[in-house]
Image (cartoon, helix red, strand yellow):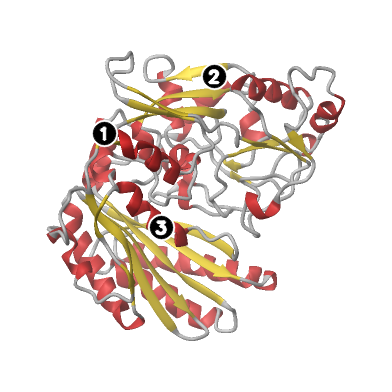
Amino acid sequence: MPRESHRNVQFCPILDARDSKDSFPEGLFSRVTPTTQLNRREALVQPVCVFVPLNVQQVASAIRILVATNTSFTPRSGGHMPVKGHASTQFGVMIATSNFNSKSITRMPNPLGYDYLSAGPAFRWQEIYEFLNPTGFLVAGGRVGSVGSSLLLGGGLSYLSSIFGWAANNIVQLELVTAQGEILTVNQNSHPDLFWALKGGSSNYGIVTRYDLKMYPSTAMYGGTVVWPANATRQYLQAQTDFILPGGGSYDDNAAIMPNFNYNPVTKTSGSGTVLFYNAPVDKPRALENFTAIPLESGGAKVQNYSEITATTTGYSPRTLRWSFYNTAIKSSEDTMGLIYNTTTNLADEMLSGVNCSTGSATQPITVNHLRAARAAGGDAIDLDPDRGPFVIALIYVTWSDAKDDAIVKSYTDRVLASIEQQARAKDLYYPWLFLNDAGVTQDPISTYGYGASLERMRAVSRQYDPRGIFQHSVPGFKLGYESHGY
């Protein structure tokens, strides 16, 4: 939580008075937040005002005023993460980057040495893929079309991660506004330590106002969203087990899945589905054969372009229900999927039988070649060792409708995570890392980077570029060694 002194909100009256309307023209801020558009119900916290700058110079000027007036603030891009008080704050100002929506491409030769896309942080990934369609290029970005740009600052998963690493490993340059209001162009040569820290460092170093991302030649590929009936859940669990074991489909770098199972503790029914992906125009590739053999309830996969595949993911980002998620990590094994499924459903029967909700897990494989590719691309603050082998990120989620159930949902989630981790440790399956983009309130993912070894270097970078700790104490989020929420 921000310090008491940072609940000062003089920034808004300063904008009201605005001696210099050249710096902040009318219409750039509002005291009324468009709540239905900004975030999910449980994640929404009402800011005192919303500032919507037109350009990077206005961001820099705003930060200087915010710091001078000791005002808490938070930047917002897509607002996908359902962590209350991260995408907004009730203590101060939301800086909405809605106007930073430019997109352009730069071809070789150029000083960065890559063909790259430049994009302001207001984008959703579907916009990026549709923009690139006519060019014959692709970027290794988010898997769900409605998710925003901040995915990159938490590492970010891509359907191409086994080839190109984390989405963040494909950043070649950023434009960043620091706590001093400086506008920096950050790349491997200009600010190598800061560039390293930003790849996984979230909101700890400044506000990003432009991303430059490597582009890769692209052709048609296989993919789409599939949903299986309740009676196929065990078949899905076995298919994913086979996929993650040695010799399974995950060992083909072109293959990827975004799997999920769900369970309703009131009706005692389950379901499952996934996005299937293969980076070649091959129908029903062998690497995915255990999934394509399961009879469908709905959806389908076929050879099509990348934006058509991601367009099938609209149901993965609901904005109508209360939604929370947390995560842990488990080594890939014969027991992994059963451990996650049985723990999630058994505790749901025990604790949530009277709650109108759905729970489940999106269990994402992380391959050895993903981690090798991350290091080959220059590394990052996440810094996971491929020699430790493959694992899965177990995102445990609940969606529900009634605020009166908030407490029992949180208790359930806490017990599920504790039980999964206890069982995993007993079987030597626990993987000591948390994925920031799937983390929840009170989790501390950055302390697990490099299995604990990255934190002090990240703090040193923070001291260099933010000596007063503004982005540690005035901006909510996953901080360097703790979690802070703006409510």
| Residue appearing at x 65%, y 69% in the figure | 407
For this orientation, the residue located farthest to the front is: 134
> Residue 464 — which label?
2
- Residue depth check, mark 2 versus mark 1: number of the one nearer the observer: 1
> Residue 216 — which label?
1
x and y, in percent, of residue 478 in the image: 55, 43
Q: CA distance from mark 2 to mark 1?
A: 34 Å
Residue type at numbered disc 2: Gln
Residue type at numbered disc 1: Tyr
The N terminus sits in image quarter: top right
- Give the residue pinned by disc 3: 313
x and y, in percent, of residue 12 in the image: 81, 32
| Residue appearing at x 25%, y 47% in the figure | 388
Q: Crowding at label 2, few (<14), some or many (≥20) Cα neighbours within 10 Å? A: some
First in residue order: circle 2 vs circle 1 = 1
**Residue 173 seen in the current view:** yes
Q: Nearer the viewer, residue 478 or 287?
A: 287
Q: Is residue 433 above or below residue 269?
A: above
x and y, in percent, of residue 46 in the image: 74, 49
